[in-house]
Image (cartoon, grey):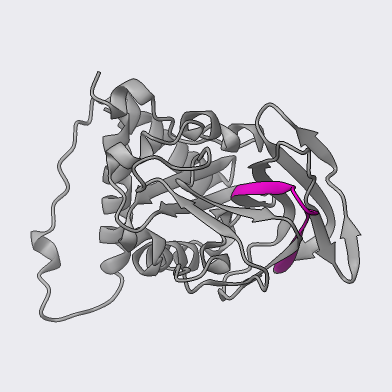
Amino acid sequence: MRYLLMLTILWTISLTLTAQTDYPFIQYNKNHLVYDTESPYMQHFAHKWQRVVENHQGSLNIVHIGSSHVQGGTFPNAVRCNLLTYLPDLVGDRGMIFPYSAARMCNNPHDYRVHCPEPVTLTRCVSANPAYNLGLCGIAVTAHDITTHIQIALQSHINYSTTQVIVIGYSQQNIVPLLSLAGRQIPPSYIDPDSRRYIYNLASTIDSIQIVIPCQQGEQFTLQGIYLSNHYPGISYHSIGVNGASLFDYLKCKQWVDDLPIAYILGSRIVRLRLRLLSGR
Protein backbone atom coordinates (compact mmCIF):
# COMPACT_ATOMS: atom_id res chain seq x y z
CA MET A 1 0.00 0.00 0.00
CA ARG A 2 1.28 3.40 -0.95
CA TYR A 3 0.91 5.03 2.45
CA LEU A 4 3.34 2.44 3.82
CA LEU A 5 5.92 3.85 1.42
CA MET A 6 5.85 7.17 3.26
CA LEU A 7 6.52 5.43 6.57
CA THR A 8 9.46 3.62 4.98
CA ILE A 9 10.79 6.90 3.59
CA LEU A 10 10.59 8.59 6.98
CA TRP A 11 12.31 5.67 8.71
CA THR A 12 15.07 5.62 6.10
CA ILE A 13 15.75 9.33 6.47
CA SER A 14 15.67 9.36 10.27
CA LEU A 15 17.92 6.29 10.41
CA THR A 16 20.42 7.73 7.95
CA LEU A 17 20.57 11.13 9.63
CA THR A 18 20.78 9.76 13.14
CA ALA A 19 23.85 7.80 12.11
CA GLN A 20 25.66 11.04 11.37
CA THR A 21 26.05 11.64 15.13
CA ASP A 22 28.48 9.47 17.07
CA TYR A 23 26.84 7.99 20.17
CA PRO A 24 29.10 5.21 21.56
CA PHE A 25 26.24 3.38 23.26
CA ILE A 26 24.35 2.85 19.97
CA GLN A 27 25.25 -0.18 17.86
CA TYR A 28 24.64 1.25 14.42
CA ASN A 29 25.73 -1.98 12.74
CA LYS A 30 22.61 -3.63 14.16
CA ASN A 31 20.32 -1.34 12.15
CA HIS A 32 18.85 -2.96 9.07
CA LEU A 33 16.06 -1.82 6.80
CA VAL A 34 14.20 -4.60 5.01
CA TYR A 35 11.90 -3.76 2.11
CA ASP A 36 10.69 -5.20 -1.17
CA THR A 37 13.35 -4.31 -3.73
CA GLU A 38 10.94 -5.30 -6.50
CA SER A 39 8.28 -2.82 -5.36
CA PRO A 40 7.59 -0.34 -8.18
CA TYR A 41 6.87 2.35 -5.56
CA MET A 42 10.24 1.89 -3.85
CA GLN A 43 11.97 1.82 -7.22
CA HIS A 44 10.21 5.02 -8.25
CA PHE A 45 11.26 6.69 -5.01
CA ALA A 46 14.86 5.49 -5.35
CA HIS A 47 15.10 6.76 -8.92
CA LYS A 48 13.61 10.09 -7.99
CA TRP A 49 15.86 10.43 -4.95
CA GLN A 50 18.87 9.80 -7.20
CA ARG A 51 17.73 12.41 -9.74
CA VAL A 52 17.20 15.06 -7.07
CA VAL A 53 20.24 14.34 -4.89
CA GLU A 54 22.82 13.56 -7.59
CA ASN A 55 21.60 15.65 -10.52
CA HIS A 56 19.60 18.40 -8.75
CA GLN A 57 16.71 17.73 -11.09
CA GLY A 58 13.10 18.05 -9.99
CA SER A 59 11.63 18.12 -6.52
CA LEU A 60 10.84 15.49 -3.93
CA ASN A 61 7.93 15.98 -1.50
CA ILE A 62 7.74 13.92 1.69
CA VAL A 63 4.44 14.17 3.57
CA HIS A 64 4.27 13.15 7.25
CA ILE A 65 0.70 12.90 8.55
CA GLY A 66 -0.10 12.12 12.18
CA SER A 67 -1.38 13.40 15.51
CA SER A 68 0.15 15.32 18.42
CA HIS A 69 3.74 14.23 17.72
CA VAL A 70 3.40 15.85 14.30
CA GLN A 71 1.42 18.95 15.33
CA GLY A 72 4.04 19.70 18.00
CA GLY A 73 6.64 19.51 15.26
CA THR A 74 9.66 18.35 17.29
CA PHE A 75 10.38 15.13 15.40
CA PRO A 76 9.35 16.39 11.93
CA ASN A 77 11.42 19.55 12.32
CA ALA A 78 14.46 17.57 13.48
CA VAL A 79 14.26 15.32 10.41
CA ARG A 80 13.61 18.31 8.13
CA CYS A 81 16.52 20.37 9.45
CA ASN A 82 18.95 17.45 9.57
CA LEU A 83 18.01 16.42 6.05
CA LEU A 84 18.46 19.92 4.62
CA THR A 85 21.62 20.54 6.62
CA TYR A 86 23.03 17.28 5.27
CA LEU A 87 21.98 18.28 1.73
CA PRO A 88 22.32 22.10 1.82
CA ASP A 89 22.03 22.51 -1.95
CA LEU A 90 18.61 20.85 -2.00
CA VAL A 91 16.51 23.10 0.23
CA GLY A 92 13.00 22.90 -1.12
CA ASP A 93 10.08 25.00 0.04
CA ARG A 94 8.73 24.95 3.61
CA GLY A 95 5.54 23.55 2.17
CA MET A 96 2.23 23.10 3.92
CA ILE A 97 1.78 24.77 7.31
CA PHE A 98 -1.16 25.69 9.50
CA PRO A 99 -1.51 28.64 11.94
CA TYR A 100 -2.46 26.45 14.91
CA SER A 101 -1.90 29.02 17.63
CA ALA A 102 -4.12 31.57 15.90
CA ALA A 103 -6.75 29.85 18.05
CA ARG A 104 -6.58 29.82 21.84
CA MET A 105 -5.19 26.73 23.58
CA CYS A 106 -3.76 25.30 20.35
CA ASN A 107 -0.02 24.61 20.14
CA ASN A 108 2.21 25.48 17.22
CA PRO A 109 5.46 23.93 15.86
CA HIS A 110 8.42 25.92 17.15
CA ASP A 111 9.98 26.59 13.73
CA TYR A 112 7.41 29.31 12.98
CA ARG A 113 5.48 31.74 15.15
CA VAL A 114 1.84 32.71 14.75
CA HIS A 115 0.06 35.76 16.17
CA CYS A 116 -3.62 36.58 15.74
CA PRO A 117 -5.14 39.28 18.00
CA GLU A 118 -8.70 38.69 16.82
CA PRO A 119 -10.80 35.71 18.00
CA VAL A 120 -11.25 32.84 15.55
CA THR A 121 -13.27 29.61 15.70
CA LEU A 122 -11.25 26.38 15.70
CA THR A 123 -12.48 23.22 13.94
CA ARG A 124 -10.59 19.91 14.21
CA CYS A 125 -11.13 16.54 12.58
CA VAL A 126 -11.19 14.85 16.02
CA SER A 127 -14.64 16.34 16.63
CA ALA A 128 -17.50 13.90 16.15
CA ASN A 129 -19.14 16.21 13.60
CA PRO A 130 -16.81 19.02 12.47
CA ALA A 131 -18.76 22.25 12.08
CA TYR A 132 -16.81 23.34 8.98
CA ASN A 133 -15.44 21.42 6.00
CA LEU A 134 -11.84 20.33 6.47
CA GLY A 135 -9.08 19.63 3.98
CA LEU A 136 -5.59 18.14 3.98
CA CYS A 137 -4.52 19.74 7.28
CA GLY A 138 -7.47 18.21 9.16
CA ILE A 139 -7.97 21.49 11.02
CA ALA A 140 -9.33 24.97 10.25
CA VAL A 141 -9.81 28.39 11.79
CA THR A 142 -12.76 30.57 10.85
CA ALA A 143 -12.60 34.36 10.97
CA HIS A 144 -15.93 36.10 11.32
CA ASP A 145 -17.58 39.50 11.73
CA ILE A 146 -14.35 41.56 11.86
CA THR A 147 -11.13 41.96 9.87
CA THR A 148 -8.70 39.33 11.13
CA HIS A 149 -4.90 39.46 10.94
CA ILE A 150 -2.85 36.25 11.09
CA GLN A 151 0.90 36.90 11.33
CA ILE A 152 3.31 34.06 10.52
CA ALA A 153 7.09 34.34 10.97
CA LEU A 154 9.52 31.51 10.17
CA GLN A 155 12.01 30.86 12.99
CA SER A 156 14.19 28.20 11.35
CA HIS A 157 17.87 28.59 10.49
CA ILE A 158 16.98 27.05 7.13
CA ASN A 159 16.37 29.61 4.38
CA TYR A 160 13.34 28.39 2.46
CA SER A 161 13.29 31.39 0.07
CA THR A 162 9.51 31.63 -0.13
CA THR A 163 8.39 33.37 -3.33
CA GLN A 164 4.82 32.14 -3.50
CA VAL A 165 2.07 31.80 -0.91
CA ILE A 166 -1.07 29.73 -1.40
CA VAL A 167 -3.93 30.19 1.04
CA ILE A 168 -6.47 27.36 1.09
CA GLY A 169 -9.93 28.22 2.37
CA TYR A 170 -13.46 29.21 1.48
CA SER A 171 -16.19 31.74 2.21
CA GLN A 172 -19.90 31.73 1.48
CA GLN A 173 -19.70 35.52 1.16
CA ASN A 174 -16.79 35.45 -1.31
CA ILE A 175 -14.35 37.02 1.14
CA VAL A 176 -10.90 37.27 -0.47
CA PRO A 177 -7.89 37.18 1.89
CA LEU A 178 -5.05 39.64 1.33
CA LEU A 179 -1.32 39.50 2.06
CA SER A 180 0.15 42.39 4.04
CA LEU A 181 3.81 42.95 3.09
CA ALA A 182 5.89 46.05 3.88
CA GLY A 183 2.76 48.00 4.76
CA ARG A 184 0.95 47.09 1.53
CA GLN A 185 -2.04 44.82 1.18
CA ILE A 186 -1.65 42.56 -1.84
CA PRO A 187 -4.58 40.77 -3.53
CA PRO A 188 -4.16 37.26 -4.94
CA SER A 189 -2.41 36.91 -8.28
CA TYR A 190 -4.85 34.14 -9.10
CA ILE A 191 -7.93 32.58 -7.49
CA ASP A 192 -8.97 28.98 -8.15
CA PRO A 193 -12.48 28.70 -6.67
CA ASP A 194 -12.81 24.98 -7.45
CA SER A 195 -9.78 24.06 -5.34
CA ARG A 196 -10.30 26.91 -2.81
CA ARG A 197 -6.83 28.32 -3.49
CA TYR A 198 -5.73 31.93 -3.34
CA ILE A 199 -2.31 32.23 -4.98
CA TYR A 200 0.08 35.11 -4.33
CA ASN A 201 3.22 35.45 -6.46
CA LEU A 202 5.88 37.58 -4.79
CA ALA A 203 8.56 39.78 -6.33
CA SER A 204 11.16 38.81 -3.70
CA THR A 205 11.70 36.16 -1.03
CA ILE A 206 10.10 36.52 2.41
CA ASP A 207 10.39 34.87 5.82
CA SER A 208 7.22 36.32 7.35
CA ILE A 209 3.74 37.16 6.14
CA GLN A 210 0.51 38.57 7.46
CA ILE A 211 -2.76 37.24 6.10
CA VAL A 212 -5.57 39.78 6.31
CA ILE A 213 -9.12 38.41 6.19
CA PRO A 214 -11.46 41.40 5.63
CA CYS A 215 -14.70 40.13 7.18
CA GLN A 216 -17.51 42.45 8.17
CA GLN A 217 -20.57 41.78 10.32
CA GLY A 218 -22.24 38.53 9.25
CA GLU A 219 -19.32 37.44 7.05
CA GLN A 220 -16.82 34.64 7.60
CA PHE A 221 -13.84 32.93 5.98
CA THR A 222 -12.56 29.45 6.88
CA LEU A 223 -8.79 29.03 6.54
CA GLN A 224 -7.77 25.39 5.94
CA GLY A 225 -4.04 25.65 5.26
CA ILE A 226 -1.15 27.69 3.91
CA TYR A 227 1.44 26.51 1.39
CA LEU A 228 4.81 28.31 1.31
CA SER A 229 6.45 27.64 -2.05
CA ASN A 230 9.51 28.70 -4.04
CA HIS A 231 9.49 26.56 -7.24
CA TYR A 232 13.17 25.66 -6.79
CA PRO A 233 14.36 22.05 -7.12
CA GLY A 234 14.98 20.31 -3.83
CA ILE A 235 13.45 18.26 -1.02
CA SER A 236 10.40 19.44 0.89
CA TYR A 237 9.27 17.79 4.12
CA HIS A 238 5.64 18.53 4.99
CA SER A 239 4.28 17.74 8.46
CA ILE A 240 0.50 17.63 8.92
CA GLY A 241 -0.81 16.82 12.39
CA VAL A 242 -3.80 17.27 14.66
CA ASN A 243 -3.62 16.50 18.36
CA GLY A 244 -5.35 13.19 19.09
CA ALA A 245 -6.16 12.42 15.45
CA SER A 246 -6.35 8.92 14.02
CA LEU A 247 -6.75 7.61 10.50
CA PHE A 248 -10.53 7.64 10.78
CA ASP A 249 -10.53 11.28 11.91
CA TYR A 250 -8.77 12.32 8.71
CA LEU A 251 -11.37 10.36 6.75
CA LYS A 252 -13.96 12.85 8.06
CA CYS A 253 -12.23 15.63 6.09
CA LYS A 254 -14.45 16.01 3.04
CA GLN A 255 -11.84 17.89 1.03
CA TRP A 256 -8.78 15.91 2.19
CA VAL A 257 -8.25 13.93 -1.01
CA ASP A 258 -9.00 17.00 -3.13
CA ASP A 259 -6.07 18.83 -1.52
CA LEU A 260 -3.48 16.08 -1.98
CA PRO A 261 -2.45 17.00 -5.56
CA ILE A 262 -1.38 20.54 -4.53
CA ALA A 263 2.30 19.68 -5.04
CA TYR A 264 1.56 18.66 -8.64
CA ILE A 265 0.11 22.09 -9.35
CA LEU A 266 3.31 23.63 -8.03
CA GLY A 267 5.33 21.60 -10.52
CA SER A 268 6.63 19.02 -8.06
CA ARG A 269 5.51 15.56 -7.00
CA ILE A 270 3.83 14.00 -4.03
CA VAL A 271 3.18 10.43 -2.91
CA ARG A 272 -0.53 10.20 -3.62
CA LEU A 273 -2.86 8.40 -1.26
CA ARG A 274 -6.21 7.08 -2.33
CA LEU A 275 -9.19 7.07 -0.05
CA ARG A 276 -9.95 3.46 -0.83
CA LEU A 277 -6.46 2.45 0.34
CA LEU A 278 -6.74 4.42 3.56
CA SER A 279 -10.16 3.02 4.37
CA GLY A 280 -9.04 -0.53 3.58
CA ARG A 281 -11.45 -1.02 0.70
> 199 or 270: which is nearer to us?
199
Please tell me whether residue 57 belongs to the stretch shown in magenta. Answer: no
Residue 182 is situated, as x and y percent measured from the top left of the image, at 87, 71
Please tell me whether residue 8 is drawn above or below residue 13 in the rendered image: above
19 horizontally vs 218: left or right: left
Q: Measuring 38% from the left and 49% from the top, which residue is drawn there?
A: 64
The quadrant of the image that shows the C terminus is top left
Q: Where is residue 132? Give x, y as percent.
A: 53, 41
In which quarter of the view is residue 154 placed?
A: bottom right
| Residues in magenta, as a range | 208-224
Q: Can residue 188 be seen in this view?
A: yes
Quarter holding the N terminus? Answer: top left
Between residues 73 and 98, which one lies in front from this camera angle? 98
Residue 175 % position (x, y): 78, 44
Q: Which residue lies furthest to the bottom in this view?
A: 24
At horizontal 14% and vertical 81% (from top left) the residue drawn is 24
Query: How many numbered marks are there?
Result: 0
Indicate the quadrant where residue 194 lies.
top right
Relative side of 40 to 82, left or right: left
The reply to whether residue 231 is visible in this rendering is: no
Residue at left offset 69%, top offset 62%: 161
- Would you say 216 lies left or right of 101 here? right
Q: Magenta part mainly helix, strand or loop?
A: strand
